[in-house]
Structure formats: structure tokens, C-alpha cells
Image (cartoon, rainbow, N blue to C red):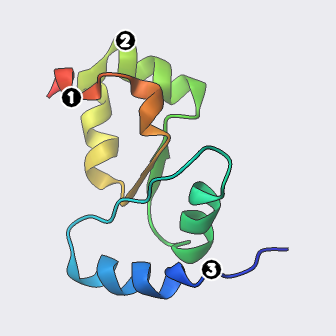
Amino acid sequence: MYIERHIQKALRERARFKGAVVVTGARQVGKSTLMETGFPDFPRITFDDKTVLATAVDEPATVNTPLASADAISELYFMGNFNRYN
């Protein structure tokens, strides 16, 4: 059972007016669940998917298209130094 978080309303409001909203925190506290539940219609990409991660590491240019169309990016820390590809 999912319990709606108080922050969901604020996130929805900010997402309407800002280009990006960053949700950070410790591991296993529900960040991805919050985004999946609070924003179910947002296209997303997750680097927790080993296939997506391997493609991003081996062929970073191929990830630009899915990233450009994603409204939510999850588990970015798996990428390590992601900025070196930009």
C-alpha cells in the first residue's frame, strides 16, 4: 500500500512551472516510487535497468534521444561521471 507523501503536491506544482525538479535522498527511501506514483504519465528512463546502463556507458550518444524525451530520470548515479559525455 502506497501512502501519498506531503511533498507530492509541492512537486506537482513545481513541475508545472520549472524545467526540472530534482528529487534526491538516501538509497531505498522511496524516491523512484514517489515519482512513479505521483507522476504516472511522465515518460521515464532508469539507469537501474542494466541494459540501459550498459548502452549508456558503451555508446553514450545513443542515450541522448531517450533522455531528451524522458520527463523523469532515475538512478543517474549509476552512470558515474555522466557529464563527461556532454
Q: Residue at x 58, y 56 (%)?
A: 32
Q: Which amino acid type corresponds to the residue marked 2 in the rendered image?
A: Asp
Residue identifier under label 3: 5
Q: Quadrant of residue 35?
A: bottom right
Residue 29 rendering spot, x and y as whole percentages = 66, 55
Residue receiving disc 2: 58
What is the x, y in percent for residue 24? 45, 53
Residue 75 place in picture, x, y as percent: 50, 40
N-term mark: 2 or 3: 3
Q: Residue 3 at what x, y percent from top left? A: 75, 79
Badge 3: few (under 14), some or many (20 or more) residues near its Cα, within 10 Å? few
| Quadrant placement of the C terminus | top left
Residue on which the image places disc 1: 83
Mark 3–mark 1 CB contact (< 8 Å): no
* Secondary element type, mark 3: loop
Q: Residue at x 35, y 59 (%)?
A: 22
Of residues 20 and 63, the one drawn nearer to the viewer in this rendering:
20
